[in-house]
Amino acid sequence: MALIVQKFGGTSVGTVERIQQVAEKVKKFRAEGHDIVVVVSAMSGETNRLIGLATQISEQPSPRELDVIVSTGEQVTIGLLAMALIERGVPAVSYTGNQVRILTDDSHTKARIQQIDDQRIRADLKQGRVVVVAGFQGVDEQGNITTLGRGGSDTTGVALAAALKADECQIYTDVDGVYTTDPRVVAQARRLEKITFEEMLEMASLGSKVLQIRAVEFAGKYNVPLRVLHSFQEGPGTLITIDEEETMEQPIISGIAFNRDEAKLTIRGVPDTPGVAFKILGPVSAANIEVDMIVQNVSHDNTTDFTFTVHRNEYVKAQQVLEATAQEIGAREVIGDTKIAKVSIVGVGMRSHAGVASRMFEALAKESINIQMISTSEIKVSVVIEEKYLELAVRALHTAFELDASNSQAE
Ligand code: ADP
Ligand code: ASP
Ligand code: MG
């Protein structure tokens, strides 16, 4: 008999019928004798709808009030699922983040979990109840409701599994595992049997939204056995594992991640003097804007161009900051581009293989896709390209690195 935390995402609880199906599934696990804690998201589309309501009232909603509003989505689904279980004769009880006491810091809309009180849940499990917990939400020291950032129910699931020392955390979703790339973009994408925490963390932070980054961080830190599975289809899913050697396949590249969330800003004709990077990026970071990729051109006529990317949501703010800096330091102009995308190849196999980046560049060149920026680390290479070429680029790279499903079957 095991203690299992099962997290069901938005589409898996998107209708009353699906909630009934989830209840059947949980009942089956329960009948096998396992202790079950279920974490649920809001019904799919609900969180967006709630944010939409808020932005009709206020262009820049108060983060505290926004959390009060968006946390309600999960409160509905926990009640419905607990009821569906009770209807089936399975004793169940639902809790909000506050009721469990999932304590977070006070960074509204992107709070971090600090501590989880496991007493109430343990007492219920002991009484034979299934405990249904609202994902995505917590409470700060002052009792304010907080939320954990989009996709945050994954993190609730993993954090609960860590706190309860669960035997496994199962993330049930609308795909049957982690794929070499988003299967909705590349039909040839292949499910991975296993992926390392390190690779999954890169994939998540480079745009693969199948798991929230913090969930992967948490799982790695507390060594929570984590598996991604399909809610309504049988199958082994994908195991996120600590051991590189354990992964059966050892391809150079495990996956391709991409995102359209960034925008690019360039400040041109900057007098090339020591401290210039600090003068430009200092005010950006002081405005709390996170910078991702950075490129400084070789100086020409004693001036240089400086380019960096930020989240698209912060593009306008960053542009204003940069305009002010340009005036101050006598730069020629500020230009920006929001129609960019970042494509990344990820794999621990890269460590032992040279020429991975050039193979990537070659594949993009063959499709006549221009690379605007490049950044590399030990296990990833990222490039910025024009957004309209994104899908073409991902498909070309998927083929170039022999990730296509037909390839693997031929082997
Ligand atoms: P949930 O609501 O269950 O949390 P999400 O929409 O957050 O589901 O995550 C599942 C989605 O992630 C899939 O439908 C898929 O389109 C997308 N996705 C992106 N990259 C990958 C990947 N590498 N493997 C699997 N799914 C991916
Ligand atoms: N409902 C939240 C969201 O849509 C949290 C989650 O689904 O994980 O982002
Ligand atoms: Mg999700």
Image: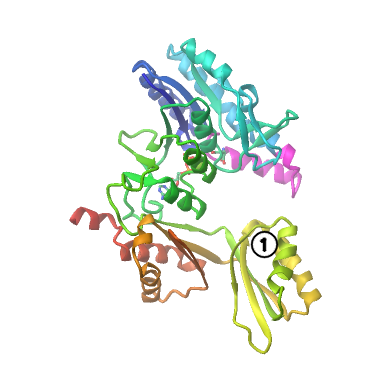
Could you tell me which residue is drawn at 42 percent across and 14 percent down?
Answer: 88
Answer with the quadrant where ligand 2 appears in the image. Answer: top right
Kindly identify which residue carries mark 1.
Answer: 315
* Residue at image location 40% in from the left, 66% down from the top: 392
What segment carries the magenta color? 41-66
Residue 216 part of the magenta-drawn span: no
- Element assignment for label 1: helix
Where's residue 403, x and y in %? 31, 58
Image quarter where the C terminus lies is bottom left
Three-letter amino acid code at disc 1? Tyr
Which residue does the image show at 38% across and 21% down from the upper left?
Answer: 2
The secondary structure that most of the magenta stretch takes on is: helix
Left or right of residue 17: residue 293: right
Horizontal side, residue 149 vs residue 180: left or right: right
**Can you name the residue that lies furthest to the right here?**
328
**Closer to the camera, 353 or 200?**
353
